[in-house]
């Protein structure tokens, strides 16, 4: 049955790669299911290298964040963030579509991570596995979820479970999961921004911010802002439930579910498009059951300008034709025939219009319309030939890369812009196909990795030059530094220090304040000593001129005052001397350490230079080995991408050829009918009234 397939939502471009670290959200949000959980306590980054990884991550540079994280993990630079770093790595790998590697990380952390972290991790892992067509692996990941997820994530889980069971052919299990979703009360979507006048939201921790970054990509923000902000997940569940019932044999039940969805008022474009899809599926199911009246009722509800309008107009015309009303069938088909001819429904309408005209007896108009259709088909085929030539020549892939440059590695980054190329309308359905999207993303990632290897090859050359210059500078400056260091004569300074220490020890033992006297005090002591000597030697001669007893008394008092001053300052000066000696020891230790460092540098630095040179050479050799392999893979993926696009366009050509054959056959029938003689009346009938 046309249109009978599981319907799922796809994340908006620009948000999908941010799902890389989705699983970290539970680390802050906990396992509660309230709409507004309490903010988690702030987490302190205790390792600089982990902080650098988070900085790159929040700068929207997940590839440098991932490489820095893996390097820091290799060198064990994040001893206090092992589990957090591993969860972040798993999330980044998950965002790049490496579901197997991410799953292995989650399984390893199952014992240490909280249940909320594990459950959300398995949910996002299941989502990515399903998007990659790995239904069994997605079902296994969903089975690892141990408790209901918070808020709208639970709706997403139930919807995903129904889609996975449908993909596995388990219509009963799909119906059970989807009915569980429909039994839930409507869930409001979170506000996209702070309302005017509302208080600012509380500051969230790093992990809560990462979690919100994730949810923005893979859950709630898929929905547009609408007047009534409720989740569309129940509508998707109802659509998939109808499909599951039909596939399971309950055709009437499935059609009833789709009919209910086809009559439901919707508040946004996403919901209206889903309603149109349900009506188209219901209408074509009725046509397959030879019930044109019911098909017309369902298809009439489809919007005239919606994304499913072409298919609805075509089916509505066939419903009228099945009721032997060719004039009524002409109304939708004439409208459809004037639309973009790259749509298969429009191409089919080109021959449906003359078919209806012929059925209505307008053979001349039908013949003209068939000839016009053949001309259109021929022009479309030539245009498809041009598009195929452009793809095989590589111009189209180059234009795609130019419009969607590989600025970052990202499996989840879809095509954002279509290049300006001839006959681009033919390529729009090709670009919308899942197979082409996957092939292009793989090719773009290979181009990104090739550019990354080229950049690192240049950096290694620069690092090699830096190492050479540093080694040359070290060789040139080391003798000069050693010469200056040898001029310090550390051993001689050590001997002087030892002599001073012995002198201080002797003065401390004798409690001699004179040993700690300052230069001025020593000068005063010398002057007093000369005065005493002068009095002793020339006192008799001076007795007649001066009062010797008074002079001697005055001299004694001066000596006593100076002695008292030296005694008072002795403790402080002794302490200062000890401190000075300690500083001398420290300075000598620094000097000896520098001398030892110079000796070690002279011995070890050449070895380090050699190790760095060997490491750079090994990395350069690895890059040279990877570049041809990567170039071969890129060329192979480019060919696969071109083959995928060419195959899709060739399918369009085959459809055109089929329509053209039908048109030629119809033209031949019309010509045969026109050349056949009119039937003559029988002999016995002549003369009768």
Image: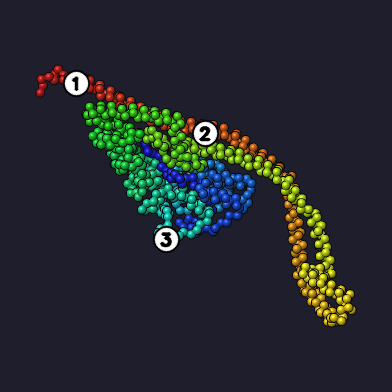
Q: Is residue 345 visible?
A: no
Q: Which mark is residue 198?
A: 3
Q: Residue at x 14, y 18 (%)?
A: 684
Splitting the image into 4 quarters, where does residue 397 fall?
top left
Depth-wise, is mark 3 or mark 1 nearer the camera? Answer: 3
Q: Are marks 3 and 1 in contact (CB under 8 Å)?
A: no
Looking at the picture, how far across and down is residue 502, in whole percent?
Answer: 83, 63
Position of residue 117 relative to residue 502, above or below, is above
Q: Is 353 positioned to the left or the right of 648 in the image? A: left
Kindly state the secondary structure of the residue where label 3 is placed: loop
Front position in the image: 97 or 133 = 97
Front position in the image: 615 or 651 = 615
Could you give the CA–CA distance between mark 3 and mark 2, rounded to whole angstroms?
Answer: 52 Å
Position of residue 543 relative to residue 104, above or below, is below
Which residue is labeled 1 in the image?
678
Q: Which mark is residue 557?
A: none
Depth-wise, is mark 1 or mark 2 nearer the camera? Answer: 2
How many discs mark residues in the rendered view? 3
Looking at the picture, how far across and down is residue 84, in whole percent?
Answer: 57, 51
Q: Which mark is residue 634?
A: 2
Q: Earlier in the sequence, mark 1 or mark 2?
A: 2
- In the picture, the quarter occupied by the C terminus is top left
Q: Earlier in the sequence, mark 3 or mark 2?
A: 3
Kindly state the secondary structure of the residue where label 2 is placed: helix
Q: Residue at x 33, y 33 (%)?
A: 341
Snapshot colouring: rainbow
Q: Residue at x 86, y 74 (%)?
A: 534
């Amino acid at each position: 049955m046309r249109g009978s397939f599981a319907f799922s939502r796809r994340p908006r471009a620009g948000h999908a790669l941010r799902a890389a670290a989705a699983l970290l959200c539970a680390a802050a949000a906990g396992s509660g299911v309230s709409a507004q959980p309490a903010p988690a306590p702030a987490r302190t980054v205790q390792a600089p290298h982990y902080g650098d990884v988070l900085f790159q991550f929040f700068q929207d540079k997940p590839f440098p964040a991932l490489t820095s994280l893996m390097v820091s993990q290799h060198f064990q630079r994040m001893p206090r963030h092992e589990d957090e770093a591993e969860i972040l790595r798993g999330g980044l790998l998950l965002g790049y579509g490496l579901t197997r590697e991410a799953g292995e990380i989650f399984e390893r952390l199952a014992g240490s991570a909280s249940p909320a972290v594990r459950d959300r991790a398995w949910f996002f892992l299941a989502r990515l596995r399903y998007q990659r067509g790995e239904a069994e692996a997605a079902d296994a990941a969903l089975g690892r979820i141990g408790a209901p997820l918070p808020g709208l994530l639970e709706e997403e889980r139930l919807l995903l479970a129904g889609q996975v069971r449908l993909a596995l052919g388990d219509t009963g299990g799909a119906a059970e999961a989807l009915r569980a979703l429909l039994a839930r009360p409507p869930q409001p979507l979170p506000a996209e921004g702070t309302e005017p006048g509302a208080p600012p939201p509380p500051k969230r921790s790093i992990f809560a911010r990462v979690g919100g970054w994730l949810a923005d990509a893979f859950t709630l923000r898929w929905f547009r802002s609408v007047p009534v902000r409720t989740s569309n997940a129940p509508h998707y569940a109802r659509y998939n439930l109808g499909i599951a019932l039909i596939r399971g044999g309950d055709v009437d039940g499935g059609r009833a579910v789709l009919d209910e969805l086809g009559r439901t008022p919707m508040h946004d474009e996403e919901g209206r498009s889903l309603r149109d899809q349900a009506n188209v599926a219901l209408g074509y199911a009725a046509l397959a059951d030879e019930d044109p009246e019911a098909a017309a009722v369902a298809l009439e509800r489809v919007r005239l300008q919606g994304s499913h309008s072409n298919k609805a107009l075509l089916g509505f015309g066939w419903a009228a034709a099945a009721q032997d009303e060719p004039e009524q069938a002409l109304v939708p088909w004439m409208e459809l025939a004037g639309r973009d001819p790259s749509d298969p429904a429009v191409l089919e309408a080109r021959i449906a219009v003359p078919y209806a005209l012929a059925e209505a007896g307008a053979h001349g108009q039908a013949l003209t319309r068939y000839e016009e259709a053949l001309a259109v088909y021929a022009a479309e085929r030539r245009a498809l030939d041009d598009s195929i030539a452009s793809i095989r020549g590589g111009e189209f892939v180059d234009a795609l890369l130019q419009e969607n440059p590989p600025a970052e590695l990202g499996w989840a980054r879809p095509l954002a812009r279509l290049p300006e190329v001839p006959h681009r309308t033919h390529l729009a359905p090709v670009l919308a196909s899942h197979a082409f999207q996957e092939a292009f993303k793989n090719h773009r990632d290979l181009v990104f990795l090739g550019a990354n290897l080229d950049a690192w090859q240049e950096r290694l050359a620069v690092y090699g030059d830096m190492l050479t210059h540093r080694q040359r500078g070290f060789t040139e400056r080391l003798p000069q530094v050693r010469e200056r260091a040898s001029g310090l004569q550390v051993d001689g300074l050590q001997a002087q220090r030892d002599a001073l220490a012995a002198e201080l020890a002797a003065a401390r033992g004798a409690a001699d304040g004179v040993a700690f006297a300052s230069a001025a005090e020593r000068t005063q002591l010398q002057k007093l000593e000369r005065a005493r000597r002068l009095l002793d030697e020339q006192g008799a001669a001076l007795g007649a001129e001066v009062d010797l007893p008074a002079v001697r008394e005055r001299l004694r008092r001066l000596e006593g005052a100076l002695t008292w001053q030296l005694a008072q300052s002795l403790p402080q000066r002794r302490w200062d001397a000890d401190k000075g000696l300690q500083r001398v020891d420290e300075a000598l230790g620094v000097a000896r350490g520098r001398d030892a460092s110079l000796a070690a540098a002279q011995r070890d630095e050449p070895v380090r230079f050699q190790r760095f040179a060997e490491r750079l050479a090994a990395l350069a050799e690895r890059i040279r080995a990877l570049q041809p392999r990567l170039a071969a893979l890129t060329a192979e993926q480019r060919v696969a991408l071109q083959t995928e696009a060419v195959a899709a366009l060739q399918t369009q050509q085959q459809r055109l050829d089929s329509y053209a054959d039908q048109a030629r056959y119809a033209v031949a029938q019309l010509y045969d009918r026109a050349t056949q003689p009119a039937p003559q009346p029988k002999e016995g009938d002549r003369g009768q009234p």
